[in-house]
C-alpha cells in the first residue's frame, strides 16, 4: 500500500523548481516567487511556520475510551475533517512539475472528495484559469469552492455568476491578490476593493461568500460590514507582503472580535494534525493547507491527496486522544499554551 513517504518522494522527483524539503517551512526557498517561496526575504512564510511551533498542546490523559471523531461541517456540508485544500495556481511555473492547472484541479477536487473534504480552486490571468476549475467543481455537484481574484467589476461579476450556476458550496475571493504586481498589470487587472464595492458583490451573491487574506481585527470587521459569511486569516503563504505577521498570531484576536458572526478559517504553514489542532484551539472553524497539498497531487494525483488528508486526520486524532478531546468541539483554548 502506498504511503505518504512514497507520494512525497515521487513529488520530489517530479518538481524541478520546488525542492520538496523534509519540512516545508520556507527556509530553502526564501524569495522564490515565481517558485514556491515567500516574497522578498521570505520571512512571512518562515514566520508562519515558526509561530506554529510556539504553541504547545496540553496533555490530559485521564479520560474515557470513546471513539474520537474529526467530523465537522463546512457551511452545513458534512466533512470528515475541517481541513481544506487551499487554492493554488501555476503548478508548472511555481513547482516545475509537468502538470497543467486543469489536470491538477481535477485530481485535487476528486481526491479531496474521496477523503471526505473539499478543495478551494484557483483563478488566474486568463479566463480559462477560472472557467476550467469552476467547470470541474460543477462536474462534482458543486462540491468545491471557486476562488475569484479581485478583478475589476465586470470580470468579477461573470465569475461569481458562473460559480453560482455551478451550484458551488461557497465562493471565495483572495482580496490580498490585489497586491500582486503581475496581476495588477494583466489585461484584466486586479485592484483593491472598498467595503462598498464588496457590499455590492455580497448582496448579489446567493452563495456563502468568503474573503481570503484578512490579517487584522480591522480587516475582519470590514469584511463583516461588507456582508462576508466567512474569512480566511491568511498572508497568502507569505507571497504578497514581506515582513507580515503570521496568520496564526493574529487569529485569536480576530476570533474574539468577530464573536461568532462569521466563519473563520486560517492558513499558513499548517503541516501536521498537531498544527490543525492548534488552529482549532485558537478558535478557527477550519484550516487550509497549500504547498503540501500541491506536493500530494503532483506526487500521487487523487490518491496522493487522499493519503495526505488521511495522514493529517490520523495525526489530529492522536493529538485529540492525548489531550482528552473526543470531538472537534472539544478542542478548546485551554488545550493549548501559546508562547508568543
Ligand atoms: C505556488 C502557490 C500558488 C498560489 N496560488 C494562489 C491562488 O491562485 N489563489 C489564492 O487565493 N491563493 C494562492 N496561493 C496561496 C494559498 O492559497 C495559501 O494561502 C497558502 O499557500 C497557504 O500557505 P501554505 O502553502 O504554507 O500552507 C498560492 C500559494 C502558492 C505557494
Image (tube, grey):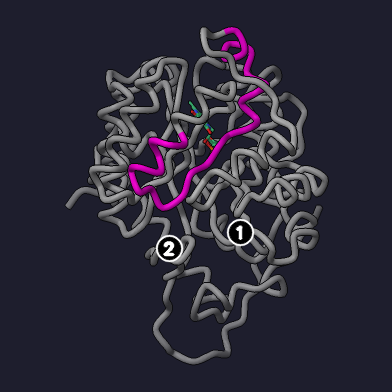
The quadrant where residue 59 appears: bottom right
Magenta stretch contains residue 166: yes
Q: Residue at x 42, y 70 (%)?
A: 71
Residues 257 and 13: in front is 257
Marks 2/1: CA–CA distance: 16 Å
Q: Which residue is mark 1?
A: 263
Does residue 28 show up? no
The image shows residue 305, relative to residue 191, as above or below, that is below
- Write the start and end of the magenta stretch as one range: 160-185
Does residue 272 show up? yes
Q: Residue at x 25, y 54 (%)?
A: 114
Instruction: Determine crowd level at label 1: few under 14, some 14-19, many 20+ residues with C-alpha closer than 10 A.
Output: many
Residues 41 and 227: in front is 227
SS under mark 1? strand
Q: Position of residue 136 (x, y in %)?
A: 27, 37
Relative horizontal placement of residue 252, taking residue 190 as reference (left or right): right
Magenta stretch contains residue 82: no
Does mark 2 have its CB less than 8 Å from ligand 1?
A: no
The image shows residue 299, relative to residue 73, as above or below, that is above
Q: Which residue is mark 2?
A: 81
Q: Position of residue 250 (x, y in %)?
A: 76, 49
Amino acid at each position: 500500500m502506498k504511503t505518504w513517504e512514497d507520494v512525497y518522494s515521487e513529488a520530489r522527483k517530479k518538481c524541478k523548481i520546488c525542492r520538496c524539503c523534509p519540512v516545508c517551512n520556507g527556509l530553502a526557498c526564501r524569495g522564490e516567487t515565481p517558485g514556491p517561496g515567500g516574497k522578498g526575504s521570505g520571512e512571512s512564510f518562515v514566520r508562519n511556520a515558526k509561530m506554529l511551533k510556539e504553541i504547545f498542546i496540553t496533555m490530559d490523559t485521564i479520560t474515557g475510551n470513546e471513539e474520537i471523531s474529526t467530523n465537522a461541517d463546512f457551511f452545513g456540508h458534512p466533512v470528515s475533517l475541517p481541513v481544506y485544500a487551499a487554492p493554488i495556481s501555476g503548478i508548472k511555473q511555481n513547482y516545475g512539475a509537468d502538470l497543467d492547472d486543469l489536470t491538477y484541479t481535477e485530481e485535487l477536487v476528486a481526491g479531496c472528495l474521496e477523503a471526505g473534504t473539499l478543495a478551494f480552486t484557483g483563478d488566474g490571468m486568463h479566463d480559462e484559469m477560472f472557467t476550467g476549475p469552476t467547470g470541474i467543481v460543477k462536474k462534482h455537484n458543486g462540491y468545491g469552492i471557486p476562488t475569484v481574484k479581485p478583478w475589476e467589476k465586470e470580470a468579477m461579476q461573470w465569475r461569481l455568476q458562473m460559480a453560482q450556476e455551478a451550484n458551488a458550496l461557497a465562493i471565495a475571493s483572495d482580496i490580498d491578490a490585489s497586491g500582486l504586481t503581475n496581476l495588477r498589470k494583466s489585461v484584466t487587472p486586479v485592484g483593491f476593493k472598498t467595503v462598498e464595492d464588496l457590499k455590492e458583490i455580497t448582496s448579489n451573491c446567493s452563495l456563502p461568500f468568503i474573503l481570503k487574506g484578512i490579517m487584522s481585527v480591522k480587516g475582519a470587521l470590514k469584511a463583516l460590514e461588507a456582508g462576508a459569511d466567512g474569512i480566511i486569516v491568511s498572508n497568502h503563504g507569505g507571497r504578497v507582503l514581506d515582513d507580515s505577521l503570521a496568520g496564526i498570531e493574529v487569529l485569536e484576536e480576530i476570533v474574539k472580535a468577530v464573536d461568532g458572526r462569521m466563519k473563520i478559517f486560517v492558513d499558513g504553514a499548517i503541516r501536521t494534525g498537531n498544527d490543525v489542532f492548534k488552529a482549532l484551539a485558537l478558535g478557527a472553524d477550519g484550516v487550509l493547507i497549500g504547498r503540501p497539498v500541491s506536493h500530494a497531487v503532483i506526487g500521487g494525483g487523487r490518491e496522493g491527496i487522499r493519503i495526505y488528508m488521511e495522514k493529517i486526520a490520523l495525526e489530529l486524532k492522536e493529538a485529540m486522544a492525548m489531550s482528552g478531546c473526543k470531538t472537534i468541539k472539544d478542542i478548546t483554548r485551554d488545550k493549548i499554551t501559546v508562547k508568543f
